[in-house]
């Protein structure tokens, strides 16, 4: 895993955006896996800026989102489909039919999950997956003890995740759905590249366990240690519990520029 420590979330997000931009430049019909939540907002802002100011072209890009709450319709203000529309898709020239978010209103959830996996496979697999991390170490909504072999399926959120996400639901935990559809850890590990972003002190413990702890399903993100092309973009606060932080800085600072965005 490559650890990239930046001064703050803005610098970390812009560095991550350069990796996304380079991929799309090299492969205009790239398949992106996308995340929601607070973490990727600055990354999406930077992609929008690249589109507006540098004419970056998303017309052939295809996307698959990690997850969606069960029971929230696409127009619910906290649905992840709406989040993606309002924070990225409406501001770039992506074709809406090329964007995919699991259907939180599916009547037959197992069939919808299998179809989602099939759609990813039909697109040729995910080239680059954007990930956040939960304070409990979840990726997508694969909560602690999720199977490392899991595929897209229904999951139950932990109480900690419900509490963390209540800030999006007027601070009211009772409004947060308990169930979701999420890509599995196996799905995420199949992506050809994984970019994880984590900012803020409340992610420091999970980041340290992910990078320097044992690979264990109790810390789902730790599976990225087994991924051949995983990059972790973090700010100083999220890096604060890493034992080898100085080494990661030394490695990154010593790289030639062309390799930093690869
Ligand atoms: C969102 C997702 C989650 C979030 C994680 C962190 O699509 O899959 O794993 O990335 O819960 O959320 P934030 O960024 O809000 O701290």
Image (tube, helix red, strand yellow):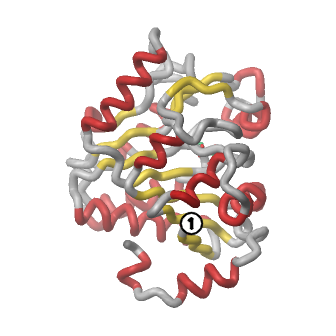
Front residue (pair 238, 244): 244
Front residue (pair 147, 129): 147
Which residue lies under the disc numbered 1?
Answer: 233
Q: Residue at position x 22%, y 51% from top? A: 29
**Residue 223 appears at what percent x and percent y?**
59, 52
Q: Residue at position x 56%, y 17% from top? A: 71
**Marker count (numbered):** 1
Front residue (pair 199, 33): 33
**Residue 177 appears at what percent x and percent y?**
66, 22
**Residue 30 appears at what percent x and percent y?**
27, 52
**Residue 187 appears at what percent x and percent y?**
45, 41
Can you say which quadrant of the picture contains the N terminus? bottom right
125 is higher (above) or lower (below) than 43 = above
Q: Residue at position x 76%, y 21% from top? A: 174
SS label for mark 1: strand
Q: Residues within 10 Å of mark 1 (few under 14, many from 20)?
A: many
């Amino acid at each position: 895993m490559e650890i990239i420590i930046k001064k703050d979330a803005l610098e970390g997000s812009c560095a991550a955006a350069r990796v996304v931009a380079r991929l799309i430049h090299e492969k205009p019909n790239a398949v992106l896996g996308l995340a929601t939540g607070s973490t990727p907002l600055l990354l999406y802002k930077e992609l929008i800026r690249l589109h507006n100011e540098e004419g970056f072209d998303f017309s052939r890009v295809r996307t698959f989102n990690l997850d969606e709450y069960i029971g929230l319709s696409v127009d619910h203000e906290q649905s992840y489909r709406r989040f993606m529309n309002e924070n990225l898709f409406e501001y770039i020239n992506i074709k809406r039919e090329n964007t995919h978010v699991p259907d939180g209103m599916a009547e037959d959830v197992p069939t919808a999950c299998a179809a989602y996996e099939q759609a990813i496979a039909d697109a040729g697999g995910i080239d680059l997956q954007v990930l956040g991390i939960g304070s409990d170490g979840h990726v997508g909504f694969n909560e602690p003890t999720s199977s490392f072999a899991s595929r897209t399926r229904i999951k139950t959120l932990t109480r900690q995740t419900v509490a963390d996400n209540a800030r999006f639901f007027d601070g009211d935990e009772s409004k947060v759905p308990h169930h979701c559809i999420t890509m599995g850890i196996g799905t995420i590990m199949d992506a050809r590249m994984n970019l994880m972003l984590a900012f803020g002190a409340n992610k420091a413990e999970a980041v340290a366990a992910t990078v320097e702890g044992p690979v264990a399903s109790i810390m789902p993100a730790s599976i990225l240690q087994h991924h051949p092309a995983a990059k972790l973009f973090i700010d100083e606060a999220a890096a604060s519990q890493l034992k080898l932080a100085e080494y990661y800085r030394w490695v990154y600072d010593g790289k030639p520029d062309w390799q930093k965005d690869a």
